[in-house]
Image: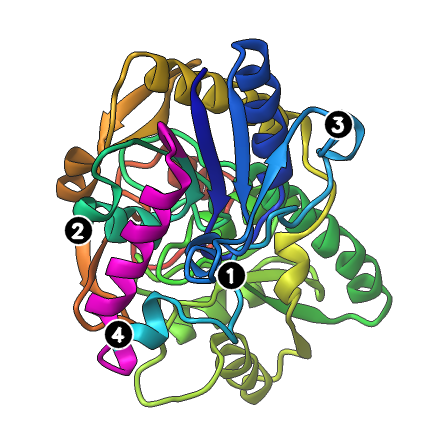
Amino acid sequence: MKKIGIMTTGGDCSGLNSVINRVVLGATNRGWQVFGIVDGTDGLCTCPPNVIEMTPATLPVEIARIAGSFLHNGNAHMMNFENAAETGHLTRFNKMLKDSLAALKLDALVLIGGNGSFSLSYKNAAIYSGLSLVCIPKTIDFDIPLTDKTIGFDTAVNELTRYCDQLLLTARSHHRWFVVQTMGRDCGRLALSAGVAVGADAIIVPEIKFNVDDLVRHINRVGRDYGIIMVSEGVTLRGHSGRPADMISRKLSASGIQNRAAFPDYIQRAGDTTAADRILAAKMATCALDAIENRETNVMTALRGNSCVTVPLSEFYAAGDLSRDPNIRELCTSNAYIEPDDPLLDVAIAMNIYIGDIK
């Protein structure tokens, strides 16, 4: 009988519980034991490691739609990669992880995480030697290379769209524009997708340069005195500091455009998991279990068209743009961004949405 572990790491998003449930269902159907690691890698640094045996009754299918992680994603009061790096204890932390995994005698580990977690796993592969490591991509930022979709992204787009739909009603009542700041870090895919969905009049993303004067002229030509301007949190404005939505809001006010900045913040990580994300969770969970059965290791699941495949973590890491992690100086993360030929950019242009200086 195989003995596998499962844990969630990094930021939370909707769909994590769907993945956990589908992994547990599929593994149980194969006659395997599943152990959930509470608080991700942080939970491996307790003595004994913080684990619970999981069965289909542990996380019933009817609550697998709920956002957040049943297993939690980490605990700021415990040792983790970030504070271990900051205090010079990274080598000790890595040894604790390796020793804990060895003590659990796992045959395999399913790690549900983002590009930071995957980059860490690739660069510290020795921690997971002796077991099959399979990673499942989840992030509302959709900044992981080599997969056509990440778990949690579709739900986040839906939540952000619903938020903006309500803002439009009060915007119309008060002849007012709303500058909505989205999450996404340095990747603008969440802002782009939700902006097209809601019918925003402008979408400002980190990947595309923009000119405030051009934005003002575009808003004045719209023919309406209300609407949505979507701004990704990674946007910068030369000569200005602060949150990008506030910076752009001030510029619009100076031009006589009545507006307010709005910050949906963590609701983008919440909301009942959409059907699309639940289906993706089931596909990726099945792909991960197949990989374990085939004795694959150091791979991630990836959506390619309508099918799930496995991709070596080495290929994931090499395929992205590398940037220094702001919290772990020793680490570069592999990142994906909006490409210039992204079809959704053409759709936005056809909808007369201002998206900046694009050829």
Location of residue 249 with respect to 134 vertically, above or below:
below
**Residue 310 as seen in the image, left or right of residue 110:** left
Q: Residue at x 23, y 34 (%)?
A: 130
Q: Nearer the viewer, residue 350 or 36?
A: 36
**Residue 85: mark in rendering:** 4
Q: Nearer the viewer, residue 147 or 349?
A: 147
Check contact, mark 4 vs mark 1: CB within 8 A: no
Residue with the mark numbered 3: 57
Residue 88 lies in the magenta stretch: yes
| Amino acid of disc 4 | Ala
Residue type at tag 3: Ala
Point out the stretch of residues depicted in magenta. Answer: 86-109
Relative to 149, say whether 271 is above or below: below
Q: Identify residue type, mark 1.
A: Gly
Q: Earlier in the sequence, mark 4 or mark 2?
A: 4
What secondary structure prevails in the magenta region?
Answer: helix
Q: For the residue labelled by badge 4, is the local secondary structure a helix, a strand or a loop?
A: helix
State the CA–CA distance, disc 2 to disc 3: 36 Å
Number of the label disc, if any, that sits on residue 74: 1
Q: Label 1 vs label 3: CA separation?
A: 23 Å
Question: Image point 44% across, 13% down: which residue?
Answer: 306
Give the structural element (helix, strand or loop) at label 1.
loop
Residue 271 location (% of width, % of height) = 72, 47
User: Do labels 2 and 3 touch, CB within 8 Å?
Assistant: no
Which image quadrant for residue 267? bottom right
The location of residue 302, given as percent across then percent down, is 35, 26
